[in-house]
């Protein structure tokens, strides 16, 4: 988490983990203090406004293969064989995703594997603070819409989608150790370790990195700079990957002349 001082306000930038276990709570005290000092919350999307019926309609429109083809057709013989091998090793029948576009298969598998080991969006950082905001009457908004997020993934090239699915399957074979290491580094604010564990891998796929991280950060930073002229304090909660590295929000703020100070507390 970082803090930026505006002319008449403060903005807290909190890198989140979207799904957590109940045992990961309570969160570090500094996060609750930042929430208490904030008048409004901004997230990647406003999760309080999600309509499950509309979401399912968007998934059917964007995430399912049209024209009679199946996942194996889009992956090609070699990649599909590798995907099947990896899926079998984690006990996920790839046949249940036969109609899914590769990007949608990837995020579905990621969610399934995390839920299998006790993670849930209900315990995620965003959901917990959104629930508090509803009780406390604090406004919640999003930088982008759910459709924009899905269209961003659907807009990846066929090769990038194949890469995303195979990377997700490969990481799923070691998901417990990966998540334990990630959350330990996250709680300690160990940005170097987070960069090594999160950014190093995604940068192997430049198109995915540009789409998921870089371009979205560039869009968000303009909105954040405008908020520094506001009189309200804000808690901005987005995925941790958006906070680290040379394209992270704190680094982009520095380029624009604003100092984002990373916050720490005794362990």
Image (cartoon, grey):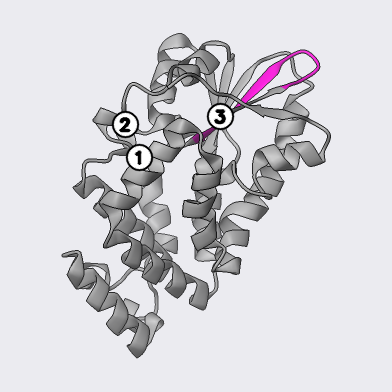
Residue annotated with mark 1? 19
The reply to whether the magenta stretch includes residue 29 is: no
Residue drawn where x is 38% and y is 72% of the image: 65
Q: Quadrant of residue 128?
A: top left
Which of marks 2 and 1 precedes in the sequence? 1
Q: Are marks 3 and 1 in contact (CB under 8 Å)?
A: no
Circle 3 residues within 10 Å: few <14, some 14–19, many ≥20: many
Residue drawn where x is 32% and y is 43% of the image: 180
Which of marks 2 and 3 precedes in the sequence? 3
Q: Which region shows up in magenta?
A: 5-15
Q: Secondary structure at mark 3?
A: loop
Q: Are marks 1 and 2 in contact (CB under 8 Å)?
A: yes
The reply to whether the magenta stretch includes residue 14 is: yes
Residue annotated with mark 2? 123
Q: Is residue 72 left or right of residue 30?
A: left
Cα distance in 3D space between marks 3 and 1 = 17 Å
Residue annotated with mark 3? 1
């Amino acid at each position: 988490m970082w803090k930026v001082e505006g002319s008449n306000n403060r903005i807290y930038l909190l890198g989140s983990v979207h799904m957590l276990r109940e045992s990961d709570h309570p969160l570090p005290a500094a996060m609750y203090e930042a929430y208490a000092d904030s008048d409004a919350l901004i997230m990647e999307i406003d999760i309080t406004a999600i309509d499950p019926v509309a979401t399912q309609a968007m998934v059917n429109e964007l995430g399912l293969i049209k024209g009679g083809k199946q996942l194996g057709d889009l992956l090609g013989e070699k990649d599909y064989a590798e995907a099947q091998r990896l899926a079998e090793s984690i006990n996920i029948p790839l046949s249940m995703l036969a109609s899914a576009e590769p990007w949608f298969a990837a995020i579905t598998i990621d969610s399934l594997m995390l839920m299998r080991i006790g993670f849930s969006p209900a315990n995620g950082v965003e959901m917990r603070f959104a629930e508090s905001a509803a009780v406390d009457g604090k406004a919640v908004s999003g930088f982008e819409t759910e459709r924009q997020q899905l269209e961003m993934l659907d807009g990846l090239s066929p090769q990038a989608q194949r890469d995303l699915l195979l990377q997700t399957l490969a990481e799923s074979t070691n998901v417990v150790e990966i998540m334990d290491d990630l959350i330990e580094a996250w709680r300690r604010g160990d940005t170097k370790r987070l960069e090594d564990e999160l950014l190093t891998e995604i940068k192997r796929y430049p198109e995915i990195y540009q789409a998921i991280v870089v371009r979205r950060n560039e869009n968000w930073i303009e909105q954040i700079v405008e908020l520094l002229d506001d009189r309200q304090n804000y808690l901005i909660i987005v995925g941790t990957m958006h906070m680290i590295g040379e394209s992270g929000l704190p680094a982009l703020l520095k380029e624009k002349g604003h100092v984002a100070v990373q916050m720490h507390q005794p362990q």
